[in-house]
């Protein structure tokens, strides 16, 4: 079944996720949907120092938004912040050094943040694909700790902050790779199966889609969305998937093309009219399951995911 899913997903990817797929889809875009100015609105972008996150932060800064960059590497983050300020002319770019794989640090960051700042839009962009099983200092598998638990803690901790503001939104950058995965709550930290970093990452991205759907139902005052940026030529792809990067080469999307739907979900008034909890690709809601792939999860399975994440989150609070 996994081979079937993977083959269908790759064929779909070559058709839709590459640069040519973006160029085809963009013919239906309404150009002025992103012709907006957002002074006075605050945006948090995790992983905003490179790739899609940096492209997103820069475009928001150009439109006058206050941008909070949440990054792990201080030197790279300071360089990105300086570049965004210089090229956008916007001085309201704040830097926060946070390792999302460390839930204790994430909790402390939010506690400090909400004392000093407001927030209208959270963009969960940061992620990692570690190809060998690696544990954090807390004994958590690194991919899960960053992509799932870190996103869960950051988002749930910021929901009370977001609910106080006008037109609050949460956008999570997922991946089309999640289409090959069914939610599996029996081995969230890859302790009992052979480790495959690509499949672990895809499972994390399925978990993000499930979380987005659950948050949307639980918090109707906030517009939640998940999105697939397509296959983009980013530092993360070059580092974690060198074979894939070499194979696709010039067919990969640019970072700006990968960031387009993130920006649309964060900025466009029409995006907030779409049903909360949806999964988007090229500014349109798309299915979260391939035909006949048997990747749907039951309410009990989804509830188990929430229970495990909440228990872990509270343990490190």
Image: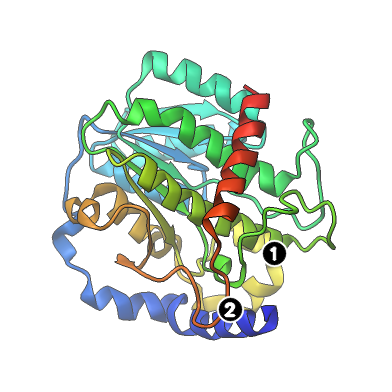
Front in this rendered view, residue 112 or 2: 2
Residue at point 37%, 74% (across, down)? 22
- Find residue 179 and report its image quarter: bottom right
Badge 1 crowding class, 10 Å Cα cut-off, few under 14, some 14 to 19, many 20 or more, is: some
**In the rendered structure, which disc, 2 or 1, sits on the residue that comes first in sequence?**
1
Disc 2, SS: helix
Query: Looking at the image, which residue is at 62% across and 67% down?
Result: 181
> Relative to residue 46, is residue 88 drawn left or right?
left
Q: CA distance from mark 2 to mark 1?
A: 16 Å
Residue at image location 81% in from the left, 55% down from the top: 132
Discs 2/1, front: 1
Q: Secondary structure at mark 1?
A: helix
Residue positioned most to the top: 115
Residue holding disc 2: 248
Residue 269 in the image: x percent, y percent? 18, 50
Q: Is residue 285 visible?
A: yes
- Of 125 and 287, nearer the camera is 287
Circle 1 residue: 198
The x and y percentages for residue 251 are 50, 79
Q: Position of residue 194 (x, y in %)?
A: 85, 63
- Most extreme residue toward the front is 300
């Amino acid at each position: 079944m996994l081979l079937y899913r993977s083959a269908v997903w790759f064929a779909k990817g070559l058709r839709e996720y590459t640069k040519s797929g973006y160029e085809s889809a963009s013919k239906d875009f309404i150009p002025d949907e992103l012709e907006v100015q957002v002074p006075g609105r605050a945006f948090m972008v995790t992983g905003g120092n490179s790739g899609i996150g940096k492209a997103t932060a820069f475009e928001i800064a150009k439109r006058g938004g206050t941008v909070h960059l949440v990054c792990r590497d201080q030197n790279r983050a300071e360089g990105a912040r300086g570049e965004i300020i210089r090229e956008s002319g916007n001085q309201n770019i704040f830097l926060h050094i946070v390792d999302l794989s460390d839930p204790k640090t994430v909790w402390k960051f939010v506690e400090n943040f909400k004392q000093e700042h407001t927030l209208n839009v959270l963009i969960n962009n940061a992620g990692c694909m570690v190809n060998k099983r690696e544990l954090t200092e807390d004994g958590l598998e690194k991919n899960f700790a960053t992509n799932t638990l870190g996103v869960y803690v950051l988002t749930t901790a910021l929901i009370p902050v977001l609910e106080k503001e006008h037109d609050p939104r949460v956008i999570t950058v997922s991946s089309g790779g999640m289409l090959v995965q069914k939610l599996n709550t029996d081995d969230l930290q890859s302790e009992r199966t052979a480790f495959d970093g690509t499949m672990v990452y895809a499972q994390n991205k399925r978990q993000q889609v499930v979380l987005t759907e659950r948050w949307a139902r639980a918090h109707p005052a906030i517009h939640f969305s998940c999105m697939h940026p397509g296959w983009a030529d980013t530092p993360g792809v070059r580092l974690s998937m060198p074979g894939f990067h070499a194979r696709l080469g010039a067919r990969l999307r640019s970072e700006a093309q990968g960031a387009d739907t993130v920006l649309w979900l964060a900025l466009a008034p029409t995006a907030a009219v779409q049903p909360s909890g949806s999964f988007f690709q090229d500014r349109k809601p798309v299915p979260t399951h391939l035909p006949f792939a048997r990747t749907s999860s039951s309410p009990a399975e989804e509830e188990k995911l929430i229970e495990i994440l909440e228990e872990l989150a509270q343990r490190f609070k």
